[in-house]
Amino acid sequence: MKTGSSQSWDSKNAAAWLKVCRQACKSEEVFKVFRSGYPTTAVCEFAIPSLGEKYIDVIKRTAPPDFLKDIAKYKINDLLGLPSVFTFPEVGSFAPTTLSYVKHLVGLMNEFGDLTGFDIVEIGPAYGGQCLVISRQFKFNSYHLIDFKPVVNLAKKYLTVHGVINISTTPADKVGSLENKQYDLLISNSAFAENSKAAQDIYIDKIIKHCRRGYLVYNTAHFSDNDLVLPEMPYSAAVMIEKLNKYFEVRVSYDIPTPVNQPIITWG
Ligand SMILES: C[S@@+](CC[C@H](N)C(=O)[O-])C[C@H]1O[C@@H](n2cnc3c(N)ncnc32)[C@H](O)[C@@H]1O
């Protein structure tokens, strides 16, 4: 789930999401349309055209000169899965969610410069749209995807069909057994932020504290204090920033309101 409700990750759409991921791995018919309806529209294919306009606005204001001229290369992310695409006067047809991935690519470039040769890890990549968009701009050394098993299986299939190489995966329930590998960059957009405090602590200990740079979209920052005290809910953004500040000097910027301001926590 993205912003807008006070439910943490597994409370609402999880079972249906895992089912569609499993089906899309097995069946080419489902793979062709997996982005076209519920539950994908609730989990990650959520953006509406008005949000797409806002993403274009941010891209125009913050991207390097000439970035927009070449934006068509990211349309590759709309070729599979039948997402809803809309025509935007300045960039042509795009799924608004793909534009969000392009906007985050620009955010990554502005924070960290050139990602060529990076070892990247992403927590909660869904079908791998952000990875595909990054791969059109930078030749990373490796990209590790951590999500539930059916989800990483789908991401692997999706990215392989698109010719993305140097991909590896770990199912979310095996994170505890990961050796403390160093990565150049951690990415998590609306995934780490949706997990329970216990799961977040495991991710910090096993992965995050070993990552030289980080880019976390903390989409649960608007949850109420009453909800956040529950153990199955995430840490508040303020507590998370304090925790991460033990390892890094973190920076906080604010994403466009979608529908509320969500912090992007970065370091490195
Ligand atoms: C709201 S979606 C965001 C997907 C993607 N990052 C994006 O921006 O479109 C949340 C994703 O996090 C995954 N997720 C939930 N809990 C997780 C966990 N403990 N470890 C890894 N991934 C998890 C879900 O399966 C889902 O793919």
Image (cartoon, grey):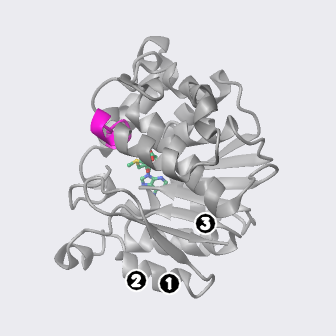
Instruction: Tell me where residue 128 sits by quadrant.
Output: top right
Marked residue nearer the N-terminal end (3 or 2): 3
Question: From the viewer's perspective, is the residue at label 1 or at label 3 nearer?
Answer: 3
Note whether residue 16 is visible. yes
Q: Amino acid at mark 1?
A: Lys
Please name the residue that numbered disc 1 is placed on: 243
Residue for point 34% across, 76% down:
236
Q: Amino acid at mark 2?
A: Val
In this view, the residue in front, 186 or 51, is: 51
Residue for point 40% across, 18% down:
33
66 left or right of 46 in image: right
Residue 151, percent from left and from top: 49, 39
Helix, strand or loop at disc 3? strand
Residue 4: mark in rendering: none
Please name the residue that numbered disc 2 is placed on: 239
Residue 261, percent from left and from top: 31, 63
Work out how far the residue at label 2 is from the one at label 1, CA to CA, in angstroms. Answer: 6 Å
Is the CB of mark 2 within 8 Å of ligand 1? no
Q: Residue farthest to the left?
A: 226
Please name the residue that numbered disc 3 is placed on: 214
Residue for point 52% across, 54% down:
172
User: Is there a contact, CB below 8 Å, between mark 2 and mark 1?
Assistant: yes
Work out how far the residue at label 1 is from the one at label 3, CA to CA, in angstroms. Answer: 14 Å
6 part of magenta stretch: no
What segment is highlighted magenta in the picture? Answer: 43-51
Helix, strand or loop at disc 2? helix
